[in-house]
Amino acid sequence: MKPAVRYLSYPAVMGGLALTLVVLAASGVAYWPVFPLLVVAGMAVVALLERLAPFEPDWNRDHDGDTRVDVLHLLVSHALIQISVAGAFGLRLWVPQWPPLWPAAAPMWAQVLVTGAIMDLGLYLMHRASHASGFLWRLHAIHHMPERLYWLNGGRRHPLSALVLAGPGLTVLLALGATPIAVGAWLGIMSVHLAFQHANLDYRLGPFRHLLGVAEMHRWHHKRDFEDAQVNFGEVFLIWDRIFGTHHDAPHSPARGEVGLNEADIPTTYIGQLLWPLRRSST
């Protein structure tokens, strides 16, 4: 069982999800409620796989009530995603359409891929900015705080940080007149990928780990020492890290006791984590 989970879980789940979402998008199926339900199902599979083949058994244990806080973060983060999709549908009716810039006649798989490239580059750039700016880092530090990595960490983001990270890419897509269902399909793919990216799951992607930001690569980005965590910023694709010199790989990714933050003053409650960056910025 474990070898099958190790080598087949990501390609089977992500490949099946991506294919299903693209086919549904091309066939004209309504986004709600089908697409969100498929995302929930995909994330549930990741959570189950963690129990079958954990990378670090201790990370499957609740740490001082962090599971409840992570659930709240995930719910808010995915509410923002749904609002973004609604905005992509709604605002398109009000934004002036220049001579067509979006390849609307292209196959849906190509439109989803172009959407992903634009979104992912924006996320990469803003992710790096969030590590360079004091205030943006305080917002983003909530994501780096946990001392364990598991599927819920993919949604652990301050709402303002989520807007900062996704805002530029979504704005470009809106300006280009992107097909809303292509945006929705990509956000669905990305949501389940983020669960895999942070999963406490012993899985491997072989040489493809250099192209995709999977857990064995992304754990380096969560190294406890801030200086060591300035690598592998890519959300889905690692091509940006290759281009801009932030790619890192090593035989063994960080494990128990090696992730988290050295800062000890971040609150452990959800409301406290929302207020902490704002209070710090005013002092």
Image: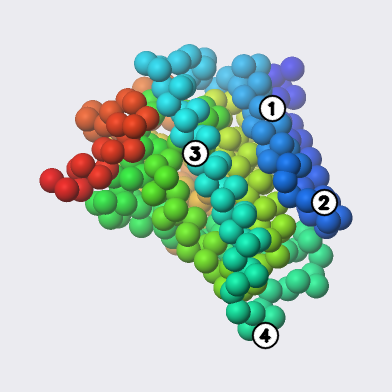
Task: Please report contact status of discs 2 and 1: CB closer than 8 Å, yes or no.
Answer: no
Circle 3 sits on which residue?
76
Horizontal placement of 184 versus 250: left or right? right
Q: Residue at x 66, y 21 (%)?
A: 48
Circle 1 sits on which residue?
45
The amino acid at mark 3 is: Val
Point out the tag, 2 or 1, that comes first from the N-terminus.
Answer: 2
Q: CA distance from mark 2 to mark 1?
A: 23 Å
Specify the quadrant that holds the N terminus.
Answer: top right
Q: Is residue 37 above or below residue 93?
A: above
SS for callout 4:
loop
Q: Which percent across, then down, holds residue 81?
A: 57, 48
Q: CA distance from mark 4 to mark 2?
A: 27 Å
SS for callout 3:
helix
Q: In which image quadrant can residue 112 be found?
A: bottom right
Circle 4 sits on which residue?
99
Q: Which percent across, then down, holds residue 186?
A: 66, 53
Point out the tag, 1 or 3, that comes first from the N-terminus.
Answer: 1
Q: Classify mark 4: residues with Cα within 10 Å, few (<14), some (14-19) or many (20+).
A: few
Q: CA distance from mark 1 to mark 4?
A: 43 Å
